[in-house]
Structures are given as C-alpha cells and as structure tokens.
Image (cartoon, rainbow, N blue to C red):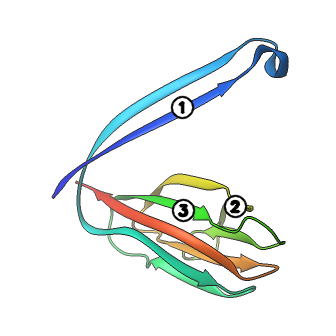
Amino acid sequence: MGTINTKLTVTGSAADYGAALSLSQTNALNVTSPSLGISRLDLAAAGDETLLAAGSAGTTFFYIKNNNTTGSGSVQIEVAGGTDYGTLENGEFAWIPVDTAAGIRLTGVSATVEVEYAYWTRT
C-alpha cells in the first residue's frame, strides 16, 4: 500500500536533567490495509470506543491524541480485552504499536474528550 515515515525527537536542557538530552529516531514503515487516516471522535465520560477489534496476528501502529486543552477529561488506552496501556491528559499524544490480535479500545474519563486518531498496519 505504501510507506509511513515516522520521526521522534526528544530534547531537554542540562538544567533540567543534569546533562543535555537530545534523542532523535526515524523509521520508515511499510504499511497495508487496514489503515485509517486522521479521524476524530467525541468520547463521552465513561464511554468507550473500540478502534480496532481483536483479530489476526500482526502489528498496527496507532497515533492517538487527546485534543482537549482544558477541563478534566482524559483518555484511557486499553487492549480491546481490558488491559490498560496508559492515559492521555489534555493535549498529550501517543504513537503505539498494537498487537492486532489484541486490538485497542479507548475509554473517556471524567468528561467528554475529543480524540484524534489514525492507524496503519505493518506489512
């Protein structure tokens, strides 16, 4: 289907970390179906949304962002069967490789949250 080029850059000052922090990684991923371009959804408090149901073996890479900038809403990221991955607070994002056999589900916490997401499956 195509190639997704990813880049992660992490920097920090010596005043904060004792030594300057500078990390940069790039990777080209060959991807195929299923995939989904940038999408958005409103996730209600205590509501959940399965973005990828548990299925066959493989890896799907997810971009997930909590678009809220104020308020108490957060996004709980879980394996579709219920095991927690982590939580995104206002403005935070994640790039997560997900075992396609496990799937992924989001749950709203405390308030409605606008979630931005996309995914691509590695060939």
Q: Quadrant of residue 36?
A: bottom left
Please report the residue visible at 39 percent of the width from the left and 63 percent of the height from the top: 119
Spatial separation of the CA atoms under disc 2 and disc 3: 9 Å
Residue 107: percent from left, percent from top: 67, 78
Which residue lies most toward the front here?
A: 69
Q: Are the residues flagged by discs 2 and 3 in contact, CB closer than 8 Å?
A: yes
In the rendered view, tell whether residue 94 sits above or below residue 57. above
Q: Residue at x 60, y 20 (%)?
A: 22
| SS state under label 3 | strand
In the rendered image, residue 57, in percent from the top left (x then y), is placed at 33, 64
Disc 1/disc 2 C-alpha distance (Å): 19 Å
Residue in view at x 43 percent, y 76 percent: 54
Residue 52 appears left or right of 42: left
Residue highlighted by disc 2: 88
Q: Earlier in the sequence, mark 1 or mark 2?
A: 1
> Quick one: label 3 or label 1, which is nearer the N terminus?
1
Image coordinates of residue 61 in percent, x first then y, are: 41, 56
- Is 117 drawn above or below residue 51 in the view shown? above
Mark identifier at residue 90:
none
Q: How many neighbours does mark 3 have within 10 angstroms: few (below 14), some (14-19), or many (20 or more)? A: many
Q: Residue at x 45, y 29 (%)?
A: 25
Q: Return the residue nearer the eye: 121 or 91.
A: 91
Q: Quadrant of residue 55?
A: bottom left
What label does residue 64 carry, if any?
Answer: 3
Would you name the residue on which mark 1 appears?
9
Amino acid tagged 2:
Leu
At label 1, which amino acid type do we have? Thr
Taking the image as shown, residue 38 lies to the left or right of residue 29, namely right
